[in-house]
Amino acid sequence: MTHPFELSQEIELGATPEQVWDAIATGPGVDSWFMGRTELGTSAGGPADLTMMGHTERATITAYEPGTRLATRSAQAPDGRFMALEYLIEGRGGGTTVLRLVQSGMLGDDWETEFEAMKAGWPIYLETLKQYLTYFTGRTPSVTTVVRPGAGGPDAVWKTVTQALGVTPDVGEGDDVRLPDGSAGVVYHANLPVNLGIRADEGLYRFIHSGAARGDVLVLGHQNFAGRDEQAAWDAWTAESFG
């Protein structure tokens, strides 16, 4: 059985509508704050595909209004499930922009768990977008994605992650951390036991735990704007830390 849903998020960004458009409506722009690799066309009917860990989720652009509105929709599954996404951009005075995101569609039997995961997940991605536009705008990153199913319960996972960062599980926004490679960072988003975001001189680093209902999956999604490929290093760290 399918269930309709809709959720919306809004964030004010210290960037122009043109800069925000480039960040949400181009593949390199989305790669700078989201996860995996995104392919976006330049008109309605074009692709809006996300590739991560060798799997591509395909969608189609349904509205393309540069500087104002972008909408996409996935194909409908045999059971009726689909996902639609809409970005609405509104310029404000002083070089700021408000971005509103609306996600809707049809979810499956486990719709409540899926909905709560999306609701908890979007704030860290939008805050990552804000960090990108503030500190790294226009730069193309080297992207790292690590997915570790069955990493352990949230208490154990966050104890390991925060110890590796030189902090405790009560870490908060603005706290200083040190990444496993020794580089310094600062927490820009803290919502444990769900997710944690860190900004360093070279990039943005996210740690996300799915919760027991979704398989105790640990997801790392990082962007290095110095062009340094960190995939092998984070693969090794995750394997060593979580067996």
Image (tube, rainbow, N blue to C red):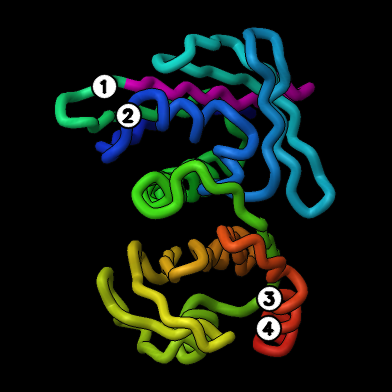
Q: Are marks 1 and 4 in contact (CB under 8 Å)?
A: no
Amino acid marked by disc 1: Gly
Can residue 124 be seen here? The reply is: no
Element at label 2: loop
* Residue assigned mark 4: 237
Residue extending furthest toward the left: 93
Q: Dividing the picture into quarters, in which one does residue 45 lie?
A: top right
Nearest the viewer among 156 and 202 is 202
* Position of the C terminus by quadrant: bottom right
Q: Which callout, 1 or 4, points to the residue nearer the camera? A: 1
Amino acid marked by disc 3: Trp
* Position of the N terminus by quadrant: top right
Magenta span includes 204: no
Q: Which callout, 2 or 3, points to the residue nearer the camera? A: 2
Can residue 200 be seen here? The reply is: yes
Element at label 3: helix
* Residue assigned mark 3: 234
Q: Position of residue 182 (x, y in %)?
A: 52, 88
Q: Which residues are magenta?
A: 76-89
Instruction: Characterize the local packing of mark 4: few (<14), some (14-19) or many (20 or more) Cα atoms within 10 angstroms.
Output: some
Nearest the viewer among 143 and 119 is 143
Mark 4 to mark 3 CA distance (whole Å)? 5 Å
Q: Are marks 4 and 3 in contact (CB under 8 Å)?
A: yes
**Mark positioned earlier in the residue sequence (2 or 3):** 2
* Residue assigned mark 1: 91
* Residue assigned mark 2: 16
Instruction: Characterize the local packing of mark 3: few (<14), some (14-19) or many (20 or more) Cα atoms within 10 angstroms.
Output: some
Q: Are marks 1 and 2 in contact (CB under 8 Å)?
A: yes
Element at label 1: strand
Magenta span includes 78: yes
Residue positioned 64% across, 24% down in the render: 82
Mark 2 to mark 3 CA distance (whole Å)? 34 Å
